[in-house]
RNA sequence: GGCGGCAUAGCCAAGCGGUAAGGCAAUGGUUUGCAAAACCAUCACCCCCGGUUCAAAUCCGGGUGCCGCCUCCA
């Protein structure tokens, strides 16, 4: 297989992928803050890294995939005041903050499962790693690059020469553009809190050497990433909006404490837009995954995501989802037809070579910075070849049939599509038809058998009026819900 | 104001120095009782200006436009 390349945000270039320890990959991806339902953005990000991890595993790497659950709400307003989001939501609903976080965490996992996204190997919760965070803060204090003021501990940005390297920001310019009020306790306006002193009314708080408090937003990822993946991790992912300040601060804290490079490859995924507009909780225009799944097939949504490079913004529109649904139907139909094929002793052996070259193209596409759009094109091209074979009507050997299905399964294993078409029993997967529709369909079959085209067309119109579409295939008529 | 990214056919979109993947839509055809599905064919010189190069959508500089970040957010 070709070498894998990846766009590293640190260099903004395509780089050859070589993990720190040959054959092994540690990847950490920033997960959700669980104070509300999961939305399209969470899905896009999770899917992007799901596919990346799938492919790295296919390529033979032993991958440890860690993605956190943030159950400390941090702050809602500016850098140093405001209210914990989890606590705020919990108070509104009159429930315990951690219970609320647990509920949304489980819901998040359910939604991801529905989308076919595998659970990370480790999904650590911030509140279960407070001791690790405290150790990291203490280390930074010892090294003199953090300071404590009245129970709050700040990272001293000027003591970290590389600060701003990831997001290419200059310290001098950060201050000028700042839109938040500067906390007078800070030595430099760009300093950020590692640990907050807790006000009395704060529910989520822990004992620390500096009194009761709670962690700053960024420290959890540093602590948990290093706990599970070591001081230098291969890939750190997350949505691009997190590059500053979150990831910048993660680098500062981690490298400040260890003196070693924190991350080899920074990988950022693009944001989801709705009809060309930014989707954000603060704008209230976000679509939850429950909303999405009520209207669209999860595999269709996956195909929609695969059509755009993971690092580009993706625009969620009706048209795009409809097109993806069409792709899914085309692929599913081909898979079902192959599965229904009566295997002959021999035939169609030319497909074996076609499958080999298709696999090579799939691998090549994924090696190019996980180019799923190219991989998707290959999935569709392969489906075209399969359809051509099917349309020819020639005999297909059992070995060829199995090889085709195995190749589809490979796409499923890496891209996540197709999966359901391969797993489900084709006959059982059809939705049950209302008796009236079924009766008319049978009546129509009879009419067609005696070449009574007038009756046949009349019955088709009646079936259409009931909301179902009927089409005739060599194997008989097929009825299904109209779009 | 600062930083970063993007600008490819009617629409979505790949492309990472050698003369434009794929999909949707459209048009013509094969097949079909008709329709659907499927298959075949047709359909772009890449925002503008300048530069580097034998060669640029791809690199550099300058414009214009859009998006994101600089504040919690995947």
Image (tube, rainbow, N blue to C red):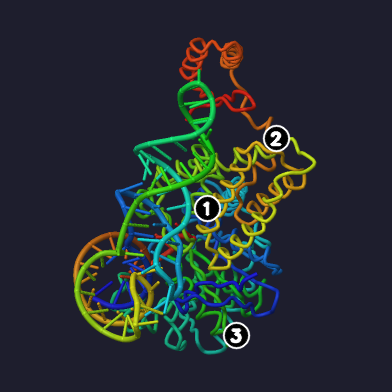
Query: Residue A86: in sight, yes or no?
Result: yes
Residue holding disc 2: A340
Q: Residues within 10 Å of mark 1 (few under 14, many from 20)?
A: many
Q: Mark 3 falls within which chain?
A: A
Question: Looking at the image, is mark 1 or mark 2 earlier in the sequence?
Answer: 1
Which residue is at the front of the view, A403 or A314? A403
Q: Mark 1 falls within which chain?
A: A
Dividing the picture into quarters, in which one does residue A336 lie? Answer: top right
Discs 1, 2: same chain: yes
Residue holding disc 3: A258
Which mark's residue is nearer the viewer, 3 or 1? 1
Question: Looking at the image, is mark 2 or mark 3 earlier in the sequence?
Answer: 3
Residue B2 position, x and y percent, is 28, 78
Which residue is at the front of the view, A59 or A460? A460
Residue A41 position, x and y percent, is 47, 54
Which mark's residue is nearer the viewer, 1 or 2? 2
Residue B74 position, x and y percent, is 49, 60
Cβ–Cβ under 8 Å for marks 2 and 3: no
Check the image and report above or below for A161 versus A177: below
Rendered image: mark on residue A196: none
**CA separation in Å, label 1 and label 2:** 33 Å
Check the image and report above or below for A456 versus B6: above
**CA separation in Å, label 2 and label 3:** 59 Å
Residue holding disc 1: A43
Discs 3, 1: same chain: yes
Q: Mark 2 falls within which chain?
A: A
From the image, which quarter does the N terminus of chain A lie in?
bottom right
SS of the residue under disc 1: helix
Q: Residue at x 74, y 46 (%)?
A: A402
Check the image and report above or below for A413 versus A432: below
SS of the residue under disc 2: helix
């Amino acid at each position: 297989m070709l070498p894998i390349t990846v766009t590293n945000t640190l260099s903004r270039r395509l780089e050859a992928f070589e993990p720190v320890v040959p054959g092994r990959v540690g990847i950490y991806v920033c997960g959700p803050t669980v104070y509300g339902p999961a939305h399209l953005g969470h899905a896009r990000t999770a899917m992007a890294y799901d596919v990346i991890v799938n492919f790295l595993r296919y390529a033979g790497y032993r991958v440890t995939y860690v993605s956190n659950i943030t159950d400390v709400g941090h702050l809602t307003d500016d850098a140093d005041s405001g209210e914990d989001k989890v606590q705020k939501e919990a108070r509104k609903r009159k429930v315990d903050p951690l219970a609320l976080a647990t509920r949304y965490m489980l819901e998040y996992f359910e939604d991801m499962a529905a989308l076919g996204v595998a659970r990370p190997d480790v999904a650590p919760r911030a509140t279960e790693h407070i001791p690790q965070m405290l150790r990291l803060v203490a280390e930074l204090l010892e090294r003199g690059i953090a300071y404590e003021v009245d129970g709050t501990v700040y990272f001293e940005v000027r003591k970290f020469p590389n600060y701003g390297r990831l997001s290419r920001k200059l310290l001098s310019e950060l201050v000028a553009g700042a839109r938040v009020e500067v906390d007078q306790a800070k030595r430099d306006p760009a300093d950020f809190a590692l640990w907050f002193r807790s006000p009395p009314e704060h529910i989520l708080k822990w004992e620390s050497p500096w009194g009761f408090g709670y962690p700053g937003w960024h420290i959890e990822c540093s602590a948990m990433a290093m706990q599970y993946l070591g001081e230098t991790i291969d890939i750190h992912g997350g949505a691009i909006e997190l590059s500053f300040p979150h990831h910048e601060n993660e680098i500062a804290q981690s490298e400040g404490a260890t003196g070693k490079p924190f991350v080899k490859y920074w990988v950022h995924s693009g944001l989801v837009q709705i009809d060309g507009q930014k989707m954000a909780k603060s704008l209230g225009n976000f679509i939850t995954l429950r909303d999405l799944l009520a209207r669209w097939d999860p595999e269709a949504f996956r195909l929609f995501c695969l059509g755009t490079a993971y690092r580009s913004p993706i625009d969620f529109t009706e048209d795009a989802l409809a097109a993806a649904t069409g792709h899914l139907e085309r692929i599913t139909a081909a898979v079902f037809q192959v599965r229904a094929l009566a295997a002959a002793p021999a035939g169609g052996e030319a497909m074996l070579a076609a499958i080999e070259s298709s696999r090579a193209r799939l691998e090549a596409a994924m090696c190019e910075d996980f180019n799923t759009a190219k991989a998707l094109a290959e999935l569709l091209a392969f489906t075209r070849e399969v359809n051509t074979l099917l349309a020819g009507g020639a005999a297909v050997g059992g070995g060829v049939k199995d090889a085709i299905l195995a190749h589809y399964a490979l796409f499923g294993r890496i891209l996540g599509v197709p999966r359901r078409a391969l797993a489900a029993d084709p006959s059982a997967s059809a939705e049950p038809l209302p008796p009236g529709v079924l009766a008319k369909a049978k009546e129509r079959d009879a009419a067609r058998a005696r070449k009574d085209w007038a009756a046949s067309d009349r019955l088709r119109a009646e079936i259409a009026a009931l909301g179902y579409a009927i089409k005739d295939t060599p194997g008989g008529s097929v009825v299904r819900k109209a779009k």
